Each structure stands twice: as C-alpha cells, then as structure tokens.
C-alpha cells in the first residue's frame, strides 16, 4: 500500500512539474505554450459574465441609435440655405479664430509677399495663391484641398475635416 501511495504522490508531483516547466524541444515547447494559452483563454471566457456584457452592448447600441436620430434631425435643420447675414457672422467668427493655415495641407491660406515666399519654388507660390473656401462651421480651407478631401471621403454626406459636422461652403 505504501509503494502505491508513494507512486501516486510522485506521479502527481511529476504531472504538476510538467505543467509548470516548458520542455526543451521546440515542437513540444510550442505545443506546451499553445495549451497554456488555450487554458488561460478558457478561464477568461468562463469568468466573464456574458449576460452583463450583452446588456451593456445592447444599451450602447440603443444610445448610438438615439444619437443618430438626433443628429439626422439636426443635420436636416442645419442644411437649410444660409442667409447673407449669417454668412457675414460666420466669416467674422472665422476671422476671430485667426486660422492662417489650411488644416488639410498645412500651407498658408493667403498669399504673403515676403522675401522668403518670393524666393521659394513656383510650386510653393502656386499653393499659397489658391482660392479659399469658408464652411458654415466657420473653418477655412483651400478650395482644392477641400475638393480632394470630399472626393476621397467614403461618407455620402459632406463633413468638415476638422469638426466632422455637415456644412455648406462659400468661396472667398
């Protein structure tokens, strides 16, 4: 009986040793770590409360749905035609912001006739002489930059590259 008990204890000790020490052979070592990773992920999945997670994700989905409906109503009210007075107010806000560079290409919005710009390459001078566009969200861009952004956009609705709001544009 004692020999059977000692054999049982040694086999149990050896099994635990095999579970804690990785083998030296690369194939067995890979298998060892795969099994360890599988055990860890199974324990993690078992410890997660799936009902709570599903409820949480459903709540997020409902919140997103409500937000989209609010934004759709807001967007339809914003996309009405903007009067001249409102464009004046928008342009004053844009001037107050004092943005001097196009946020897309990071080049100056207006041509500056300084000695450095006169010495710069013709391509740089051509970039600084581009037409500017004012958006209804008060952001300023080069016309060509905004057109390129609109062409590359995956969205059906035009959104401002800076604030992501729907807009109407006006050339300056």
Image: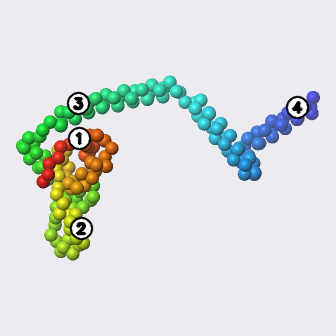
Q: Residue at x 18, y 43 (%)?
A: 168
Q: Which residue is mark 4?
A: 5
Q: Secondary structure at mark 3?
A: helix
Q: In front: mark 3 or mark 2?
A: 2
Rendered location of residue 117, percent (x, y): 20, 71
Q: Depth check: 10 or 67 in front?
A: 67
Q: Which residue is mark 1?
A: 166
Q: Depth check: 12 or 110 in front?
A: 110
N-terminal of the pair, mark 1 or mark 3, is 3
Residue 66 figure quarter: top left
Rendered location of residue 52, percent (x, y): 48, 26
Q: Which residue is mark 3?
A: 73
N-terminal of the pair, mark 4 or mark 3, is 4
N-terminal of the pair, mark 4 or mark 2, is 4
N-terminal of the pair, mark 1 or mark 2, is 2
Real-space Cα separation, disc 4 to disc 2, in angstroms: 87 Å
Real-space Cα separation, disc 1 to disc 2, in angstroms: 31 Å
Figure check: 37 above or below 122: above
Rendered location of residue 95, percent (x, y): 14, 53
Q: Depth check: 139 or 121 in front?
A: 121
Residue 124 disc label = 2
N-terminal of the pair, mark 1 or mark 4, is 4
Q: Residue at x 22, y 55 (%)?
A: 144
């Amino acid at each position: 009986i004692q020999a059977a008990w000692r054999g049982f204890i040694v086999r149990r000790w050896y099994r635990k040793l095999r579970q804690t020490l990785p083998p030296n052979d690369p194939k067995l070592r890979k298998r060892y770590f795969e099994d360890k990773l599988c055990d860890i992920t199974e324990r993690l999945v078992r410890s997660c409360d799936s009902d709570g997670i599903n409820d949480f994700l459903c709540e997020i989905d409902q919140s997103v749905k409500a937000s989209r409906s609010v934004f759709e109503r807001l967007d339809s009210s914003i996309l009405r035609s903007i009067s001249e007075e409102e464009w004046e107010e928008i342009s004053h806000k844009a001037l107050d912001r004092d943005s001097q560079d196009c946020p897309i290409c990071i080049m100056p919005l207006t041509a500056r006739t300084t000695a450095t710009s006169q010495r710069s390459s013709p391509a740089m001078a051509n970039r600084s002489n581009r037409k500017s566009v004012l958006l209804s969200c008060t952001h300023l861009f080069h016309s060509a930059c905004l057109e390129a952004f609109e062409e590359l956009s995956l969205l059906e609705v035009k959104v401002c590259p800076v604030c992501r709001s729907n807009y109407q544009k006006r050339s300056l």
